[in-house]
Image (cartoon, helix red, strand yellow):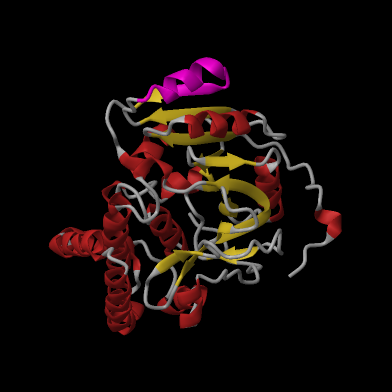
Amino acid sequence: MARDAAKDKPDRPSEASVSVIVVAWQSGDDLARCLLALARQTAPPLEILLVDNASTDGAPQAAAKTLPQVRLIEAGANLGFAAGVNFGALQARGDWLALVNPDAFAAPDWLERLLAGAARNPGVGCFGCRQTLAGAEGRLDGLGDVMSLPGIPYRGGYGLVDPGPVEEGECFSACGGAMLIRRSLFEAMGGFDEDLFMYCEDVDLGYRIRLAGGACRVIPDAVVDHVGSASTGGAGSDFASFHGARNRIRVFIKDTPPLLFGLTLPLHALATAILFLRLAGQGRLGPNLRGARAALADLPAAFAARRRTQAMRRASSWDIARAMTWNPLDLLGRRVVIRRARRSGDSAP
């Protein structure tokens, strides 16, 4: 899907105010680089809100002193990513929220291209971008989040060759590491689920947007360079593995609509078992198994969340199934899945 060369320069979007939210915890030198890139955007944001989750490295305070565009918000404790973003959003003044991880470094025109994508898709309220893998030239960190039929989400293209700015289209959900969402939509969805703390909270938000009848677009010519899990020891750390395993099960229970839930529960259990066998062979089973046990111990709360979520559902099981990938090779190979954008019915409350 080659992009038309005439689109190299985005159309100047209509006037829109954007509040950028960065949640930091022990982010070190990455944070200053992240904020400097945001301060130098060709479409300057209305404000840059830096939520400090009680870091002890002094990086948030130093960055706020250096960059006058940054407003430091002290959370007073480590709220996690989900609650940290929600805390920042309560104080945001923009019509749009741009969420950026402290280890993500936006290209100068990143926000301009996302806003141009929003102008082209006025019925859509959530947008992802192309994330390249920092320190691995020519490799993707992600190009839209994908949901497989067994209910196992993954970041499309992670570690694969970067295809460049392919044609924009629809992804299942936007990666919270670098995304743009209309503030009114974020508020209507109740923000991120704070019980997830971090990991899969972005998939959960995207899933709930779909259940409400909305959709998400990925804008591939909007680019960030992303380290990934820099504050939590890396993607394969015990912390990331525990929360990833716990939250995958929680999101499956909470968000999968009734008919699809009954049909795919055996597939979810099988896919989880196969994943755990692979992890055991890599010596990484322990934290993943503890995460799964934590999810099962919390089943009453998960089903209570499910009742609340499904009560607001407008989309059918078939609508959700069509937005998933049914090809098991996509999941195994972490393939990018971008679908032709729908022309109508994209709006959500």
Q: Quadrant of the N terminus?
A: bottom right
- Write the residue at 23% across / 58% down: 287
Return the residue nearer the eye: 110 or 310.
110
From where the camera sits, is residue 235 visible?
Answer: yes
- Left or right: residue 123 versus residue 189 is right
* Magenta-drawn stretch contains 66: yes
**Residue 203 counted in the magenta span:** no
**Residue extent of the magenta highlight:** 57-72
Q: How many labels sit on residues?
A: 0
Q: Is residue 256 left or right of residue 35?
A: left
Q: Nearer the viewer, residue 132 or 179?
A: 132
**Residue 91 seen in the current view:** no
> Which of the 4 image quarters holds residue 163?
bottom right
> Where is residue 282 shown, x and y percent of the image?
32, 68
Corner quadrant of residue 242: bottom left
Which residue does the image show at 65% across and 37% down from the upper left? Answer: 16
Is 301 on the left or on the right of 129, as rendered?
Answer: left
Q: Position of residue 38 (x, y in %)?
A: 60, 33
The residue located at (18%, 58%) in the rendering is 301
Question: For the view shown, which residue lies furthest in the top direction?
Answer: 65
Q: Residue 148: x, y in percent?
A: 44, 74
Q: Is residue 336 placed above or below 129 in the rendered structure?
A: below
Residue 150 occupies quadrant: bottom left
Residue at point 62% right, 28% down?
39
- In the image shown, does 148 or 244 lie closer to the viewer? 244
Q: Could you say where residue 245 lies in the image, as x and y percent from the top left?
A: 29, 62
